[in-house]
Image (spheres, rainbow, N blue to C red):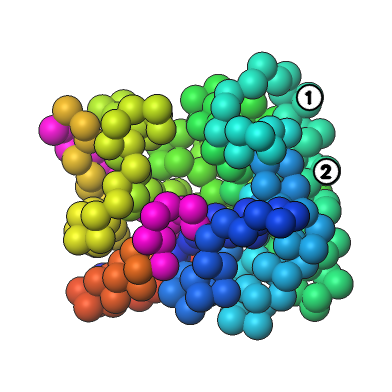
Amino acid sequence: MPTIDLNCDVGESFGAFTIGADADMMASITSANIACGFHAGDPAVMRRTVRLAHAAGVGVGAHPGLADLGGFGRREMRVSPQEVEDMVLYQVGALAAIASSEGATLRHVKAHGALYNMAARDRGLAEALARAVRVFDPSLVLFGLAGSELLRAAAAAGLSAASEGFADRSYEPDGSLTPRSTSGAVVEDVETVVRRGVRMAVEGRVIATDGSELDLKIDTICLHGDTPGSLELARALRTGLEQVGVSVRRFSGPSR
């Protein structure tokens, strides 16, 4: 049976607004993608979330996004590769400084929302994102959508990469994630999420929206902290994985 990392986007509260149950989520996940202030999060939330992850033994990762607080970083924007490299470097550096202040070590980088999806298909943006990670710290792991330009850019840059699958999102036949504007893009039914996640981990397969089956090599499975019932989903998915013999632990090796 494989070893699977279970990651979640957290630290997405800001100011007076609370999003997600970060403290409770730490008991079920092994890697935390912490928002860096562009799409969500603020310095206080970043520090608090790093502290939570570090205390729970959860891997601390930077979750950089587009400068789109109003759209939660999920609206595509026209940005150049240089702009992507600069904004990712800025955000990763900020989260790394906070992690260091808490005695934690930054372990990975995973882009958020629209930036993630844009870099998954755009070679230039993927290479820019990988460059930002490499120049900051080449030991960091870059998380990317299975089969995407992000993983190819990571390999070309000499970075370790984690191939990512999504248990709570639907897939298009080309392996991309279904746009959130489409009905059914977010999977909320607990049994369905668990079944999809277990099959990804054990068989490396998932059913696309047209009924076709995709082959995916998965190192880490993502859940979203802002998905309704995310805490229940995380608990159920981890239990489901462990019940079939999958070892759930933080990603620490090269992509298969």
Picture quadrant where residue 210 is located: top left
Q: Which residue appears at 62% of the width and 59% of the height?
A: 18
**Disc 1, SS:** helix
Q: Which mark is residue 90?
A: 2
Residue 98: x, y in percent?
82, 64
Q: Between 242 and 11, which is closer to the camera in this rendering?
A: 11
Label 2 neighbourhood size at 10 Å, few (<14), some (14-19), many (20+)?
some
Task: Count how many numbered circles sit on residues in the image.
Answer: 2
Q: Is residue 98 magenta?
A: no
Residue 211: x, y in percent?
13, 33
Q: Which of marks 2 and 1 is in front?
A: 2
Label 1 neighbourhood size at 10 Å, few (<14), some (14-19), many (20+)?
some
Q: Which mark is residue 82?
A: 1
Furthest residue in direction left, as rendered = 211
Residue 126: x, y in percent?
61, 31
Picture quadrant where residue 177 is located: top left
Whether residue 37 sits left or right of residue 22 in the image: it is right
Picture quadrant where residue 96 is located: bottom right
Q: Is residue 223 magenta?
A: yes
Q: Between 111 and 11, which is closer to the camera in this rendering?
A: 11
- Examine the rendering and report whether any part of residue 134 can be seen: no
Query: What amino acid type is highlighted by mark number 1?
Result: Gln
Give the magenta part as a residue range. Answer: 211-231
Query: What amino acid type is highlighted by mark number 2?
Result: Tyr
